[in-house]
Image (spheres, grey):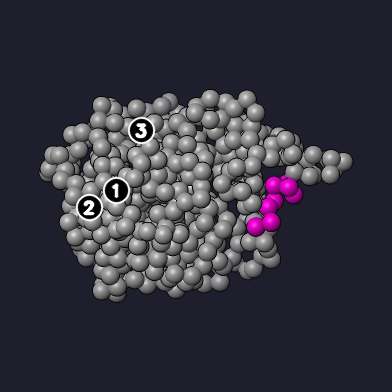
């Protein structure tokens, strides 16, 4: 194999069997035209682990509504949050851009003076001109000073916390106004749900974008009385089961209003479980480590998408995708186009959602970069993942893992595949040389 020239060899080795078969024969363009302008419900859990839903193998947490959503839609096995902690993950979700491009690489806190720049374009800001009513109900965490709140970044309506539920003074806000401080957290998930249902009811006659970033199951854990003490998994399980109930309420509302068929519902989470919290933390299942790290457990998340009539029921997608891609994909579904005056990292992954059409051939070589704060610590292309940094420091020896054979990241193959190591290092250098990171916003 060494005799094969480097340049011709690497692409084939970076072309994993799974991706090759999924790309396979290229069918004609999308078989079904999408219904015009679906409603969009984007549910974003906080610190939920890869293994915390029934349909992702949890033995103790019951999530019948999310399991049903997965049966009626598509479930991704290799879906990533774009950062292993809250603020950068949310910035990436709402802009489709890596946090190093927006400067939102660090966790904002109640002393932060900074937030999302006015020049950034959020998903709400691109959907609103397309006729969408927009709401953010839940945790924002992209700046709590007045100019950074959701109403200044495309959302018609905001109800929720400006930052994490473990940060004081924990104000509960409606639009720009503090209505409760500290927020009464036992009823937070229930109240988010009531607000979400009311928003859907108010806007059922026009397209709407409901962004529902739950404050839970981030610690401190709180659940309504109706859910406390129910789960064999303890309070953490109660909290996730209430989020599952919440999802069921939203789906029931869509059904009652006759909007189920023209609504795209997406469920995922911002980062992996906060393992140092012991029993109050979730589980990354078989994946290594959790929140704050670029091991798979820190960034790989459950992801379910359902859109009856467009996304066939019961699919499982094993190609990787990320929250970066949701910006572009949801925008395209709404009839919009990516902003052209800046780099948007997210791809249109409609073919992965629907199973019809195909991603462009070059997509087999598309990289996903794992960052911790400003540091690029790993890259994935196909099923190869190369770690080049850890704990914010460069690794002396890069580590290479085959995520298809070894999703647990236990067997470093760097010594056996030096050409792949070099090729992936080259991808990292190209990316790093391609732009100057934005100043850190804190
Ligand atoms: Mg989080």
> Which image quadrant is residue 53 in?
bottom left
Q: Is residue 15 left or right of residue 146?
A: right
Mark whose residue sits in front, 3 or 1: 1
The label nearer to you, 2 versus 1, is: 2
Query: Which badge, 3 or 2, comes first in the chain's sequence?
Result: 3
**Element type at marker 2?**
loop
Q: Check if residue 15 falls in the magenta segment.
A: yes
Count the numbered circles shown. Answer: 3
What are the residue bounds of the magenta stretch?
Answer: 11-18
State yes or no: Cβ of the residue under disc 1 lies below 8 Å from any atom of ligand 1.
no
Does the rendering let one see residue 148?
A: no
Seen in the picture, residue 30 relative to 270 is either above or below; the reply is: below
Say which residue label 2 marks.
223
Which labelled disc corresponds to residue 216? 1
Q: What kind of element bears circle 1?
A: loop
Cβ atoms under marks 2 and 1 closer than 8 Å: yes
On the rendered image, what quadrant is the C terminus found in? Answer: top left
Q: Quadrant of the N terminus?
A: top right
Sooner in the amino-acid sequence: mark 3 or mark 1: 3
């Amino acid at each position: 194999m060494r005799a094969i020239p480097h340049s011709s060899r690497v692409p084939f080795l970076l072309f994993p069997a799974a991706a090759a078969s999924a790309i396979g024969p290229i069918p004609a363009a999308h078989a079904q035209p999408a219904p015009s302008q679906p409603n969009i419900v984007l549910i974003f859990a906080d610190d939920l682990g890869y293994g915390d839903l029934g349909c992702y193998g949890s033995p103790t947490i019951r999530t019948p509504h999310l399991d049903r959503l997965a049966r009626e839609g598509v479930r991704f096995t290799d879906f990533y949050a774009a950062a292993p902690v809250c603020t950068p993950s949310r910035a990436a979700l709402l802009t489709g851009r890596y946090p190093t491009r927006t400067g939102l690489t660090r966790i904002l806190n109640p002393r932060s003076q900074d937030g999302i720049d006015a020049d950034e374009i959020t998903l709400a800001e691109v959907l609103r001109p397309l006729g969408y009513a927009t709401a953010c109900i839940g945790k924002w965490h992209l700046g709590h000073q007045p100019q950074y709140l959701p109403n200044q970044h495309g959302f018609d309506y905001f109800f929720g916390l400006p930052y994490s539920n473990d940060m004081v003074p924990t104000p509960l806000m409606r639009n720009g106004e503090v209505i409760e401080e500290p927020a009464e957290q036992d009823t937070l998930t229930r109240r988010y749900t009531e607000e979400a249902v009311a928003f859907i009811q108010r806007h059922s006659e026009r397209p709407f974008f409901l962004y529902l970033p739950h404050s839970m199951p981030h610690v401190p854990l709180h659940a309504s009385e109706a859910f406390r003490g129910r789960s064999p998994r303890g309070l953490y399980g109660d909290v996730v089961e209430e989020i599952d109930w919440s999802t069921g309420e939203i789906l029931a509302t869509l059904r009652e209003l006759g909007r189920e068929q023209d609504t795209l519902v997406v469920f995922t989470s911002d980062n992996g479980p906060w393992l140092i919290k012991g029993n109050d933390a979730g589980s990354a299942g078989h994946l290594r480590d959790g929140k704050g790290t670029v091991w798979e457990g820190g960034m790989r998340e459950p992801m379910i998408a359902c859109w009856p009539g467009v996304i066939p029921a019961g699919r499982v997608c094993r190609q990787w995708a990320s929250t970066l891609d949701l910006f572009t994909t949801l925008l395209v579904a709404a009839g919009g186009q990516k902003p052209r005056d800046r780099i948007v990292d997210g791809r249109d992954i409609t073919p992965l959602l629907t199973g019809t059409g195909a991603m462009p051939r070059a997509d087999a070589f598309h990289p996903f970069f794992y960052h911790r704060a400003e540091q690029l610590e790993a890259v994935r292309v196909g099923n190869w993942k190369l770690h080049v940094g850890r704990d914010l420091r460069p690794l002396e020896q890069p580590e290479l893992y085959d995520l298809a054979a070894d999703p647990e990241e236990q067997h470093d193959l760097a010594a056996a595949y030096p050409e792949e190591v070099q090729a992936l290092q080259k991808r990292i250098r190209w990316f790093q040389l391609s732009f100057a990171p934005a100043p850190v916003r804190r």
